[in-house]
Image (spheres, helix red, strand yellow):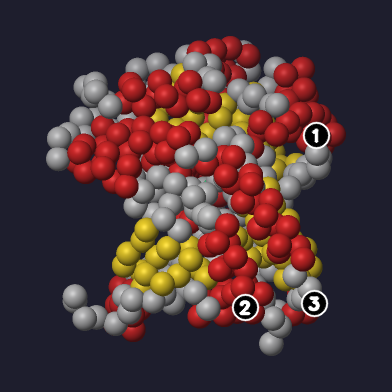
Amino acid sequence: MSGSSSKTYLEEANKYSAKNYHPLPVVLCKGEGVWVWDVEGKKYLDMLSSYSALNQGHCHPKIVAAVQKQVAKLTLTSRAFHNDQMGPFMKRLCELSGFEKCLLMNSGAEAVETAIKAARRWGYTKKKVAKDKAEIIACENNFHGRTTTIVGFSTEPLYQNGFGPFTPGFKIIPYGDASALEKAITPNTVAFLVEPIQGEAGIMIPPAGYLKKAREITKKNNVLLMADEIQTGLGRTGKLFACEYENVRPDVLIVGKALAGGMYPVSGILADEEVMSAFVPGNHGSTFGGNPLGCAAGLAALDVIVEERLAQRANEMGEYFMGELCKIKNPAIKEVRGKGLLIGIEIKKEFGLARPYCEKLMELGILAKETHDQVIRFAPPLVIKKEEIDWALERILKGLLPR
Ligand SMILES: *Cc1c(COP(=O)(O)O)cnc(C)c1O
């Protein structure tokens, strides 16, 4: 016991940390499954799961064991050499997702950057787009990460302002509008980058059939469909990948977050040889990408998703949770929407911002976070049980009462 209180840690963070986040004032020191504990020993139900990076729950014993075994054996080789963990992990990931090839990175933003680079190189080498003319189409209110190139095609001023000049070559269209996609395509278009559900934008679900139409349009025009499933993937929405809801197979599937069960940053893109052959030795890489520790965690994390049928559980528990949330009679609620265990409650503007509701929920033992001003996201670990959802519902009911 260090004896330090939350107050001390909050003051310390306040003093030394860049203010690039506005966290809830809770200081956590332990996690197990869907539960976390603060330094005073108070227990909370984690309904954010680190933005869906903890689909398998906190400190899943099987992933902990894999990490513990590997951390004492070999952690990093760089890609200058091979290691014995990367192959088995990529084989499993390719087999599960149905792609021929995989390229491993660390953070989600790096995987998106990798997809962008793949699309451009594919465009120049295969589609024969003239040098430096490649265009990529993305959507309004997208969230694909925080690098300078990626924030350059964000439409959220907060993510973008003050970080220019930006990388050219991106075109923005409204989300959910397939005819806008068709119109935006030119002979120089190499890819359409899209989230199957926009998580950060506030759990925005496109019209039924949107992805399927986008698939048809991109195929017809020889444009790559690149699905960013960093947040929606790996079981979160009730399928292993949200694209499966419309039987869509993208050309590039971007994964991250829960890929290593929250124990290590592991991300990557999946594609077939036709696209992946855009990369040749030396033209892309990462020192830590494909490291044995991350791959050992990743293999165990994938095993957990399959063995514990987490996608199916997200589907079942999500249906129950959404159903109960929809029954709540509360004048502050504008809408409840979601798929699987990616759920948002939109608060009516006249009832104030979502933030104070999250603070109230925290007091009641529920950790949830607002996304943008009006939406509270509920995305618990997929290992959550019905009793735990009931525990949460009791508190959500109280926490959402307008004051
Ligand atoms: C979180 C997220 C990213 C970025 O991942 P980081 O690991 O934070 O870089 C990209 N796209 C989507 C859809 C995300 O949810």
Q: Which mark is residue 336?
A: none
Residue sitting at 61 percent across and 61 percent down? 377
Q: CA distance from mark 3 to mark 1?
A: 32 Å
Q: Which mark is residue 399?
A: 2
Residue sitting at 32 percent across and 64 percent down? 30
**Farthest residue toward the bottom?**
403
- Which image quarter: residue 43? bottom left
Crowd band around label 3 with a 10 angstrom C-alpha radius: few (<14), some (14–19), many (20+): few
Q: Give the image location of residue 372, x and y in percent.
A: 63, 64
From the viewer's side, name the closer residue of 7 and 194.
7
Q: Amino acid at mark 1?
A: Gly
Nearer-N-terminus badge (3/1): 1
Q: CA distance from mark 2 to mark 1?
A: 36 Å
Q: Give the image location of residue 198, x and y in percent.
A: 66, 48
Q: Which mark is residue 209?
A: 1
Q: Which residue is mark 3?
A: 331
**Farthest residue toward the left?**
72
Residue sitting at 79 percent across and 73 percent down? 329
**Quadrant (top left/top right/bottom left/bottom right) for the N terminus:** bottom left
Pair 2/1: label in front = 2
Q: Amino acid at mark 3?
A: Pro
Tell me, yes or no, if residue 51 can be seen here: no
> Does the Cβ of the disc 1 residue fall within 8 Å of ligand 1?
no
Q: Is residue 201 above or below residue 70?
A: below
Nearer-N-terminus badge (3/2): 3
SS at circle 3: loop
Crowd band around label 1 with a 10 angstrom C-alpha radius: few (<14), some (14–19), many (20+): some
Q: CA distance from mark 3 to mark 2?
A: 13 Å
From the viewer's side, name the closer residue of 252 and 319.
319
**Farthest residue toward the right?**
179
From the viewer's side, name the closer residue of 291 and 61.
61
